[in-house]
Image (cartoon, helix red, strand yellow):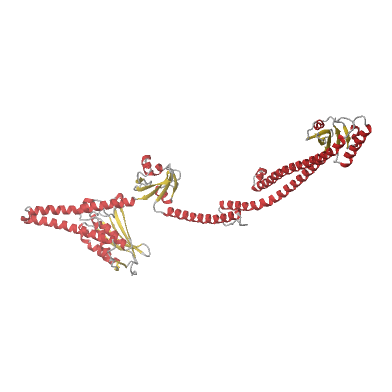
Amino acid sequence: MNGIRFFRTIQVKLIIIYVLLILIAMQLIGVYFISTMKTSLTSTFTNNMNEQANLISAIAAQTLSNKPDKTGASSEQSTEEYLSMLVSNLFSINEAEIQVLDSSGKVMATSQQSHQSYIGKKNTALAVSRALQGIPNNEQEVIDEDGVRKKIIAKPVVFSKKIVGAVYMVASMKELYQTVDRINRIFMSGMLIALGLTGVLGVLLAHTITNPIKGLTRQAAAVAEGRFDQQVPVLGNDEIGRLSEVFNDMTIRLRDALSANEEEKEKITSILANMSDGVVAADERGVVMITNRRAQQMLRVEECGGIHLTELFSMADDQLSALMNGYESSAVIHHVRSDGEEDELMRVTFTPIHKRDKGISGTIAVLQDVTEQERLEQSRREFVANVSHELRTPLTTIKSYAEALNDGALDERELGQRFVGVIRNETERMIRLVTDLLHLSRLDSNQATLRRQQTNVPEMLEEVADRFSFQMRKKAIRAGVRVEDGITSIWLDRDQIDQVLDNLVSNAIKYTLDGGRIEIMARKTDANNIAISVRDTGIGIPKKDLSRIFDRFYRVDKARSRNMGGTGLGLSIAREIVKAHGGTIALDSELNEGTTVTVMLPIQAGGESA
């Protein structure tokens, strides 16, 4: 496997390409060169033979034309001797045989001493027959028994336009082919040397190309692992050098982009984690992918991933589909708390995520806790209804008695005075109601400034008990004031705190049966706070009403409270006054056992404790 991977590297591929290119080029050059060289040598060899054959033919023409007949034996012998001397001494081609033939094809002379026996015999070669027939160009290549390639040329000997004989030449081409073989060997040696040098140069050249590429590969792997501190060395101004520069620039830009992306991601994560609203992201199928911590707190779940929105929000599929597709924008869902307390209301606002050319690819759901908002809205509606009711009742009474007076009751003195008394009482009731509302309004808008003064606590509590002593004696209610040792005076608005204590004692008297007991106490809870409590043994308050006892116009026993002249705003005013002093007010009650209201006030608030 490693060997296969090695041959797939660019370096080996470049070397192989260089070697193959040189090999192919050398082969093409060699084939062309050797072929041309062989053709040239063969042509030169053949031309040389033809020139000598033509020369011999020209010289021998005169001799053969003057050849005597068969009766002149001595003349014929002299002719053969002359021709033998001619072909032996004047013309010589390496390992070549030259024969001069008469017109009958009989050998007159030969250049080879070993073939002297051929003289007088007929040469029956095809080339000779063609030459004696007057065909000028008779060339032939043959391979003899020894495997030696030979060139055969036969030329007619013409004298006075008459063929008087022929010249027959046979020359060995052994040296020519040996020369060609030597050239082939020289070329092969040169080619092997060139291939070796090409391989070495190819390795060096491929190394110069692949080394920067390896550096780029290592840097790319480092970037993929998140390491952007390294740089690729720029080794030149060529394409690879330019690529290295661009890669380094890309690394810097990618590092900056990833850094900015991480920063934005951290910002988004921080925003999602600290949002007061819950955020739920789901895919196109409605399966939850991401939630923030607030959403998990609101939905009372530890992990929302993989849960379908219908299950998470407890809503129908058609309603969820309408919200996810944008047909509806929001919905209010009820979340039942497991602790048995009041259900929570949450408004879910859906925003589809649109992806280019792919439609809706997901949904973002934003959860808002509107429980308090709905509670305040309900309180506002109840407040308006209560004010309207509280004002309408005395106005109706006043109107009725005014109409009765107008209809003649005024003429009856006793009846008229009673009706006027009713009108006066209802008017005073409305004045108290409006006064309490104005007081609450000033407290809500922080317009009721505190006039703090050093106030003696035991004295203040004794005065409160004295103010209601007559009412308590009428109901045979026993009263007691207890102040813990060490409590003398604190800084507070005496008038407003008196109003708070008056309201608490008044309520205690109203709801305590004859013969009951009311205690007013003061004690230190710590070094900085003092607790003033009003405890009675009255009818108490049911548990279900305790959470709303400080709401405006809220009455436990509405009919009895209204008959007693209450407006339902006393405890609300008391709470706002105590809050303005920086304190708190709490109520503890058991039905038919009694009620304890505790006002916690800071000892040092605008002045030093005495």
Residue reaching furthest left? 411
- Quadrant position of the N terminus in the picture: top right
Q: Quadrant of residue 308?
A: top left
Give percent across and percent down for residue 501. Answer: 27, 61
Q: How many marks?
A: 0
**Residue 595 relative to residue 147: left or right:** left
Q: Is residue 198 visible?
A: yes
**Residue 158 relative to residue 341: left or right:** right
Q: Quadrant of residue 157?
A: top right
**Residue 85 relative to residue 601: left or right:** right
- Above or below, comparing residue 225 to residue 49 in the picture: below
- Above or below, comparing residue 321 to residue 565 in the picture: above
**Residue 396 relative to residue 568: left or right:** left
Q: Is residue 173 visible?
A: no
- Quadrant position of the C terminus in the picture: bottom left
Residue reaching furthest front? 160
Give percent across and percent down for residue 347. Answer: 35, 48
Comparing 549 with 2, the one in front is 2
- Above or below, comparing residue 578 to residue 192 in the picture: below
Residue reaching furthest right? 74
Comparing 369 with 93, the one in front is 93
Query: Residue drawn 13% across and 53% down?
Result: 399
Give percent across and percent down for residue 546. Answer: 30, 52
Comparing 139 with 437, the one in front is 139
Give percent across and percent down for residue 3. Answer: 67, 43
